[in-house]
Amino acid sequence: MKRKSIFGLVVIAVAIAVIISTYASSSTYSSFSEAKETNSELHIIGHLDKKKELYYDATKDANYFSFFMTDNKGQECKVVFSGTKPEDFERSQQIVLTGRMLNNEFHASKILMKCPSKYTQDKLETTEVSAKKADI
C-alpha cells in the first residue's frame, strides 16, 4: 500500500475512536439504584423531599449541606453536598445532581435547580387582575 493510503486509514481510525469515546462518555440521567451499582460520576434528576429536614449550619461547617431527594424512579436517598446551600433551594421544582454514591449517601459535586419561573407568577397575577376587573 502507498504511504498516503496507510496514513489516511490511520486518520480515519483515530477519528472513529474519538467519536466513540466522546459518545461513550456523554452521560444520561441515572437513578440512585444505578449509582449504588457503579462508582462513576452520574447525573440524577429528581425532587426534593420536603417532608424531611434539610441540614445546613453555616456556623459549624459552611461547606456541608444535606437533604433527602427522590429520583424519577421513586427511590429516596440522602444527598450530601460539599458547598453552601443554594439560595431558594426549597422552592426548586426539580433538582439535577452530579456526583457519586459513597456509603449509601449520594455525594454531589454539583447541584442544578429548576426553580419556578417568575414569568409564570406574573402570568398568574395578570390573570387574577383581569378576573377581578371583570367582576367590577
Image (cartoon, rainbow, N blue to C red):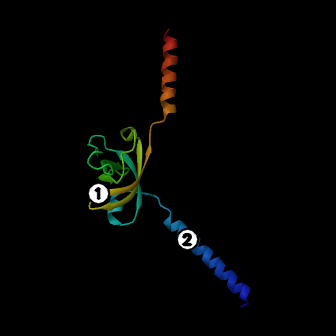
Question: Between tags 1 and 2, which lies in front?
Answer: 1
Instruction: Give the percent coordinates (x, y) of residue 111.
Output: 41, 50
**Relative depth, front residue between 42 and 60:** 60
Cα separation between marks 1 and 2: 32 Å
**Could you tell me which residue is drawn at 49 percent across and 66 percent down?**
25
Q: Does 59 sit left or right of 71 as displayed?
A: left
Element type at marker 2? helix
In-front residue for pair 92/80 = 80
Quadrant of the rendered structure where residue 31 is? bottom left
* Residue 11 % position (x, y): 65, 78
Q: Is residue 5 above or below residue 126?
A: below
Percent x, y of residue 62: 32, 48
Tell me the residue at 33%/51% (across/down).
63
Residue at image coords 50%, 68%: 24
Amino acid residing under circle 1: Glu
Q: Quadrant of residue 109?
A: bottom left
Q: Which mark is residue 20?
A: 2
Crowding near the residue tagged with mark 1, few <14, some 14–19, many ≥20 C-alpha atoms within 10 Å: some
Amino acid type of disc 2? Answer: Ile
Residue at 32% of width from left, 57% of height from top?
A: 106
Question: In x, y percent, where is residue 43?
Answer: 42, 57
Is 45 left, or right, of 10 in this rendering?
left
Q: Tally the numbered discs.
A: 2
Q: Secondary structure at mark 1?
A: strand
Along the viewing direction, whichever of 72 and 50 lies nearer the viewer: 50
Q: Residues within 10 Å of mark 2 (few under 14, many from 20)?
A: few
Is residue 94 rendered to the left or right of residue 56?
right
Residue 118, above or below 47? above
Image height check: is 11 above or below 85?
below
Furthest residue in direction top, as rendered: 136
Residue beneath label 1, please? 105
